[in-house]
């Protein structure tokens, strides 16, 4: 997700499902990602093997009753949106999952507040003081060096709400406002959300309001469920309900993390070395002679960046004739 965006957005941020009737290659084809450079890797959670590309894993070779398990993280969702050849992206993928009666195990939907709708400290204080009404019993507030986070619902809940300071989590210290509200939906709740016949923002707002409300205390009424909803929660519901689905290129997301490390964390050291070296070519020579072991994640960034460029090349063919020049 581009951290410099200045509008509030709603996006899918995790998807996992299992199938007992498809091969890993058929799942990749259903994702519209057959053209991407998949890598064979060791599996997890009882699966012997997996195919991996851009934070999307296709696990296979488990017990006969386990089938094939597809897991797509937040960055994987961005890569799917950017690189999939499916005409309607999420709609086509959900239609395929539903038409084949596959088991959707988890679906995360996130609202990113970049404009100051939510004050994370106010939300955390209201949670600690239990000024909220929820269908979930478990709650926790964590304040740490990586920001403040609020969780309503246990990790085993079918519906879990997480609200946290995304800017702090990502290490941004330039004063930007970025608060994320996540709905983590499991099993039947995940499938139900993906079938709601309305825009993602309206569906998100409706589910959220049904499961959680922050309220203003009323000393004249001991029944908290009758307390008025806070203005800031209504502001959130009103804002998110008008938003349609937002997608961003996954490659830009991964590259941004790399740029953040190079320029924000190692920038001073790089600047010093550039001044010490007699020329830029000397600096590049030192870079190429580095002694650190190759890191696979940086190789993946390069591969994904190339895949993104190839995707743009394919898309332009829908609007522009591309053919070999013939000699006259």
Image: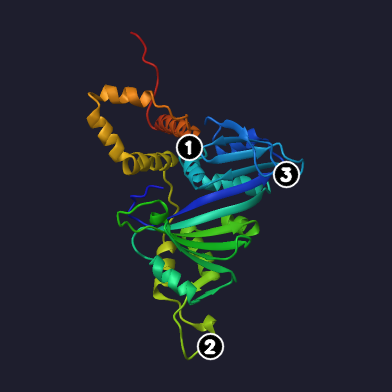
In this rendering, would 90 be left or right of 23?
Answer: left
For mark 3, does the 10 Å Cα neighbourhood hold few (<14), some (14 to 19), or many (20 or more) residues? some
Q: Which of marks 1 and 2 is in front?
A: 2
Furthest residue to the right? 64
* Residue at screen point 35% across, 39% down: 262
Image quadrant where residue 22 sits: top right
* Residue at screen point 53% across, 67% down: 140
Of mark 1 and mark 2, the one earlier in the sequence is: 1
Disc 1, SS:
helix
Q: Can residue 116 be seen in this view?
A: yes
Badge number at residue 83: 1
In this view, 216 is above or below 29: below
Badge number at residue 292: none
In this view, 249 is above or below 305: below
Spatial CA distance of label 1 from label 3 is: 28 Å
The residue carrying mark 2 is 222
Asked if disc 3 and disc 2 are in contact, CB closer than 8 Å, the reply is: no
Disc 3, SS:
loop
Furthest residue to the top? 328
* Residue at screen point 41% across, 29% down: 313
Whole-percent x, y for residue 142 in the image: 48, 64
For mark 1, does the 10 Å Cα neighbourhood hold few (<14), some (14 to 19), or many (20 or more) residues? many
Spatial CA distance of label 3 from label 2 is: 49 Å
For mark 2, does the 10 Å Cα neighbourhood hold few (<14), some (14 to 19), or many (20 or more) residues? few
Spatial CA distance of label 1 from label 2 is: 54 Å
Whole-percent x, y for residue 207 in the image: 54, 65
Whole-percent x, y for residue 103 in the image: 67, 50
The residue carrying mark 3 is 66
* Residue at screen point 42% across, 54% down: 169
Whole-percent x, y for residue 241 in the image: 44, 63
């Amino acid at each position: 997700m581009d951290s410099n965006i200045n509008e509030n957005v709603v996006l899918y941020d995790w998807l996992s499902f299992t199938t007992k009737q498809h091969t890993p290659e058929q799942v990749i084809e259903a994702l519209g990602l057959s053209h991407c450079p998949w890598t064979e890797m060791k599996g997890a959670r009882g699966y012997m093997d997996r195919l991996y590309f851009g934070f999307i894993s296709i696990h296979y070779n488990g017990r006969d009753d386990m089938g094939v398990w597809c897991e797509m993280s937040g960055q994987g969702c961005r890569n799917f949106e950017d690189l999939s050849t499916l005409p309607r992206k999420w709609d086509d993928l959900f239609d395929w999952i539903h038409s084949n009666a596959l088991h959707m195990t988890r679906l995360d939907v996130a609202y990113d507040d970049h404009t100051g709708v939510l004050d994370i400290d106010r939300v955390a204080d209201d949670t600690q003081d239990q000024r909220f009404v929820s269908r979930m019993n478990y709650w926790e507030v964590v304040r740490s060096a990586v920001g403040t986070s609020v969780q309503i619902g246990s990790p085993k809940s079918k519906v879990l709400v997480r609200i946290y300071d995304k800017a702090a989590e990502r290490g941004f210290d330039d004063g930007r406002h970025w608060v994320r509200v996540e709905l983590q939906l499991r099993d039947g709740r995940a499938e139900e959300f993906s079938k709601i016949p309305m825009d993602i923002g309206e569906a998100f707002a409706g589910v959220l309001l049904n499961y959680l409300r922050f309220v203003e205390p009323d000393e004249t009424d001991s029944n908290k469920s009758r307390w008025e909803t806070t203005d800031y929660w209504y502001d959130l519901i009103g804002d998110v309900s008008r938003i349609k689905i937002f997608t961003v290129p996954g490659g830009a997301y991964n590259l941004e993390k790399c740029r953040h490390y190079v320029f924000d964390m190692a920038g001073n050291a790089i600047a010093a070395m550039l001044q010490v070296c007699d020329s830029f070519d000397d600096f590049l020579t030192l870079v190429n002679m580095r002694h650190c072991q190759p890191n696979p994640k940086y190789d993946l960034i390069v591969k994904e960046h190339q895949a993104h460029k190839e995707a743009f090349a394919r898309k332009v063919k829908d609007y522009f004739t591309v053919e070999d020049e013939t000699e006259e």
